[in-house]
Image (cartoon, rainbow, N blue to C red):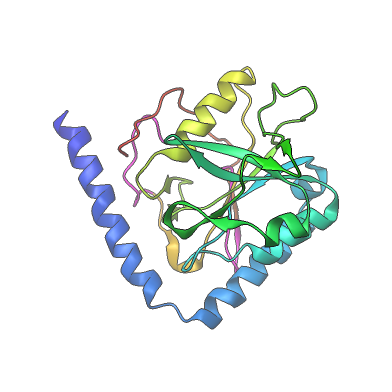
Amino acid sequence: MAAASATVQAKKSLRAAISKIKKAIPDAQIALQSQQITNHILSSPYFQKSQGVSCYLSIGGEVDTSSLVLSILRSGKKLFVPKLDSGSLHMVRLYGEEDYRTLRSGVWGIKEPAWEWENKRRESGKPTDEDSPGIDLMLMPGVAFDKGFSRIGYGKGYYDQFLSRYTASKSGASPLLVALTLKEQLLEAGKIPVEDHDWKMNLIVTGDEVLTNDTPPNQPSTVNTEA
């Protein structure tokens, strides 16, 4: 218990340190790196092969996904974006540019869809939905990542919970997890404190490089919502 508590505290300290670093990054640098990352994603084989893509809707200080979201919508692929409801993260479909541009801000000022679009329930990213292929590519946000493919999120465990539910409903199969990160958020391997429930990334994409995890470890089956 003491070790777990120490890890949680270490994560909080790291989040605070990275937050200070991010605030010092000029907007022009964030825009440049975001465009470089967008260009890589759109030209990658894994994006070309994907059918259902999950992408977060960015807020200040993150890799800007606005251009990427529009490109995914124009590609004809199914795009699923995060929606929080009753303390759980869901992935629901966006249907086009008008849908995207009329989104309202939800929790923490992050734009998210209503449950319905044009008087119909939105398609979810769950593979159990009859008409949904599920999500085969997930573009992940994070406070920081390290070169050991570890991720630290914002401390609520939303993505860990979603991925555990998703893989349980798909016989253990996980989407390809691709981290989008500013180079200032990428740390050396082992710098992020990890616990058994933490998910590893398959790839990490910055403006300057792409790191590939050729031998991803077994992913967790349970999550801790406080990590």
Residue 11: % across, % down: 28, 48
Quarter of the image holding residue 39? Answer: bottom right
Q: Quadrant of the N terminus?
A: top left
Q: Is residue 209 left or right of residue 141?
A: right
Nearest the eye: 6 or 154 = 154
Find residue 174 and report its horizontal and vertical position in percent.
61, 30
The residue located at (42%, 56%) in the rendering is: 108
Magenta highlight: main SS: loop
Q: Nearer the viewer, residue 111 or 205?
A: 111
- Pick the quarter of the image with the C terminus: top left
Whether residue 182 is visible here, answered yes or no, is yes
Judge left or right: residue 100 versus residue 56: right
Would residue 218 be seen by someone viewing this image from the given angle?
no
Instruction: Relative to 74, say whether 140 is above or below.
Output: above
Rendered residue at 53%/32% (across/down): 163
Q: Is residue 187 above or below residue 130?
A: below
> Residue 222, image x and y in percent?
41, 24
206 in the magenta segment: yes
Q: Position of residue 162 (x, y in %)?
A: 51, 33
Closest to the observer, 218 or 60: 60
Left or right: 75 in relation to 210: right
Q: From which residue to which does the magenta span run?
A: 190-210
Residue occupying the point 38% across, 78% down: 24
Q: Is residue 40 left or right of residue 148?
A: right
Q: Is residue 160 above or below residue 179?
A: above
**Residue drawn at 39 percent across, 29 percent down:** 223
User: For residue 24: magenta?
Assistant: no
Picture quarter containing residue 213?
Answer: top right
Foreground pick, 81 / 167: 81
